[in-house]
Image (spheres, rainbow, N blue to C red):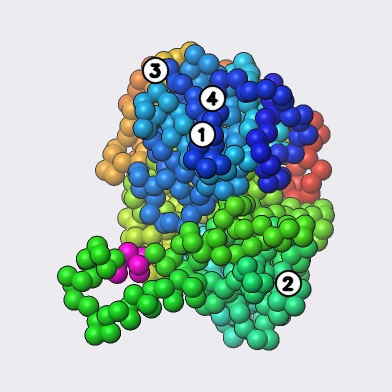
Amino acid sequence: MIRKYRFGNPFNTEAVVQDLPVEEGAPAFLVIEKGDENGAVITYSMDESTRVYGLGENVRGINKRGYKYISNNTDDPNHQEDTRSMYGSHNFLLIEGQERFGLFIDYPSIITFDIGYERCNTLEISCDHMDLDLYIITGETALDIVKQFRVMIGRSYIAPKFAFGFGQSRWGYRTDEHFREVARLHRENHIPMDMVYMDIEYMEAFKDFTVNPEAFPDFPALVQDLKEDNIRLIPIIDAGVKIEEGYDVYEEGVEKGYFCKRKDGSNFVATVWPGETHMPDFLNKDARKWFGMKYKVLLDAGIEGFWNDMNEPALFHTPERLAELREILDKYPDGFDLADYDSPEIGLQKAINAIANNPEDYKLFYHNVDGEMVNHAEVHNLFGYNMTRAAGEAFEELKPDQRVLMFSRSSYTGAHRYGGIWQGDNKSWWSHVLMNLQMLPSLNMNGFLYTGADIGGFLSDTTRDLVLRWLALGVFTPLMRNHSCDGTRLQEFYRFEGPEDFRSVISARYRLIPYIYSEYMKAALKDEMMFKPLAFVYPEDEVAVDVEDQMMLGNEVMIAPIYKQNAMGRFVYLPEDMMLVKFLADGSIYTEEMAQGIHYIKVALNEVPLFIRKGCCIPVAEKAECVADINTENLTVLGFEGASYEMYEDDGVSKDYDLEKYIRVISK
Ligand code: GLC
């Protein structure tokens, strides 16, 4: 049962697709009060046993209790335990205690979720304006509540099947030869691969929808040549459009008035990778359509997928903020010594740091929403969502019968209908492997099924064992991409000693694609989660509800990745009898039935473990080096005798999804 309550005059975010009546009276469970000025403060009294799930993209555990999180889309690559805001805002909570309910707050600006941080037993949600829609969802189980929420926000984006293969990425590939080399070295080393990602260097001076003609003398030929080898190129598109006379996207945007404006009507300027840029007004539906149609030039060159970036939007600085900084610097014409530099009165260091992503800059520009000028700060969290939507809506028009790969960095609930997200700029840290795992169920609750993290870590220098262990988690995430930052240690798998170890781990992914793809499709088409916390599946098991480093994958499998350096194995809790499956380096598969309880399992760096639930089975294909080569006629069925499995198999390209037509039952 979903009840919708309205306070004030909320902005229509279009996060929700169901048309629900607005209830009279006060919502159950919560106390809602006016905060300072026109603010809202929503509180709920938690009992000792209450667990709180959700909030999509955020740091820390699966149970979010005990910390304070802020929905405020932010380009901050330092994902630490004290990070309060990441790139997306997903204001859905699931509360499980003596009372059980889901709570979605549809509010497009900064909103704080204090989940027992100031006061241990109080959940306090606060924002500056009492203009919001609030939804209370009740149901028999956590999974039932999530499902109702997912139906309410609309079906999740479905990626083409090739996008379930492995993708290699690095900020630093610059030329036609680079891309051919990456493709060739993967094929020569027999490391399976389906995609090579193109970061900003492919463009001409970082201008969206251009390809550097010197570095790529015949871009369509490159796209075609790689495609013949079943490798797709996936270019990045950034939010900011470079200001440059003669650049058609810039000139058209200015002429049509499709960029975000300052109060005086001039176009807002911000510096990002291309230098000074204008920000397309993605909240203006005409501008959105215009920008979306620009993807055509790359689709026409044979491209079948994209990633959208810098769309929080990230602002390195604006002329306004630079002027402010200059004023401070002018006070010290002869420079400053270290004492001055650190002095809190002068705040020089603070001033320098504050020029990027400054909240004051978000107040400087406006969107044209159906003729009304809306200040960006009021709708900040919707920018990336509407950039993804620009692309998604255009793809519907440009490629009505073909799925196009799309995922974004920034998002809000609703964006899940148009694309996936990656988990942003992480680091080559062991703790980020665990973070990758723990974020999966909360993203799934919010409809983001096509997701994964930069395997190996984006920033800082990685290590061989970290890449292997991370990869052994990545083999289960729909988006499986190795991505790293220019200047860091090279981390293509063939850069390390013993590439055969990487080959054997990644081979497990290709063997599991019939299962992973089926579970993805079922989750999308039934509005369910693909990755579930053990607590949702075994709610009566008091050990299982506390497990935060294992995850249910689909309806048959549990995973337990290793996320500690030098560990030869790990303890795993089995909430019921299960079958341990290990993909071994020699290509064979080890299986062992294990009783409910705690087990120590040994896992070598080149192995991939998983567990099959009692009474279940899963399909496993032979090895393949690309998705197109997976043979689903010749499957091994692993699991318990007498079990059967509904495998979903379609062409992976067209959009006539159908849970009956494409199901094939296989049995053990
Ligand atoms: C941002 C992206 C990262 C990309 C870089 C350069 O930091 O998050 O993935 O490599 O920009 O485009």
Provide residue 536's location: percent of width, then percent of height. 53, 23
Provide residue 642's location: percent of width, then percent of height. 62, 17
Q: Quadrant of the N terminus?
A: top right
Kind of residue sitting beneath label 2: Gly
User: Pointer 4: residues within 10 angstroms few (<14), some, or many (20+)?
Assistant: few
User: Pointer 1: residues within 10 angstroms few (<14), some, or many (20+)?
Assistant: some
State which mark lies toward you, 2 or 1. 1
Provide residue 365's location: percent of width, then percent of height. 60, 64
User: Pointer 2: residues within 10 angstroms few (<14), some, or many (20+)?
Assistant: some
Query: What's the mark number on residue 100?
Result: none
Q: Mostly what secondary structure, the magenta segment?
A: helix
Label 1 sits on a secondary structure element that is strand
Label 2 sits on a secondary structure element that is loop
Label 3 sits on a secondary structure element that is loop
State which mark lies toward you, 3 or 4. 4
Kind of residue sitting beneath label 1: Val
Judging depth in this view, the residue of 175 and 271 nearest the camera is: 271
**What segment carries the magenta color?**
348-353
Judging depth in this view, the residue of 304 and 336 nearest the camera is: 336
Label 3 – label 2 distance at C-alpha: 54 Å
When the figure is inspected, residue 554 is found, relative to residue 421, above or below; the finding is above
Kind of residue sitting beneath label 4: Val
Residue identified by numbered label 3? 48
Kind of residue sitting beneath label 3: Glu
Label 3 – label 4 distance at C-alpha: 19 Å
Judging depth in this view, the residue of 355 and 178 nearest the camera is: 355
Tell me what residue is drawn at x 63 percent, y 67 percent. Answer: 263
Residue identified by numbered label 1? 41
When the figure is inspected, residue 497 is found, relative to residue 636, above or below; the finding is below
User: Pointer 3: residues within 10 angstroms few (<14), some, or many (20+)?
Assistant: few
Label 2 – label 1 distance at C-alpha: 38 Å
Residue identified by numbered label 4? 31
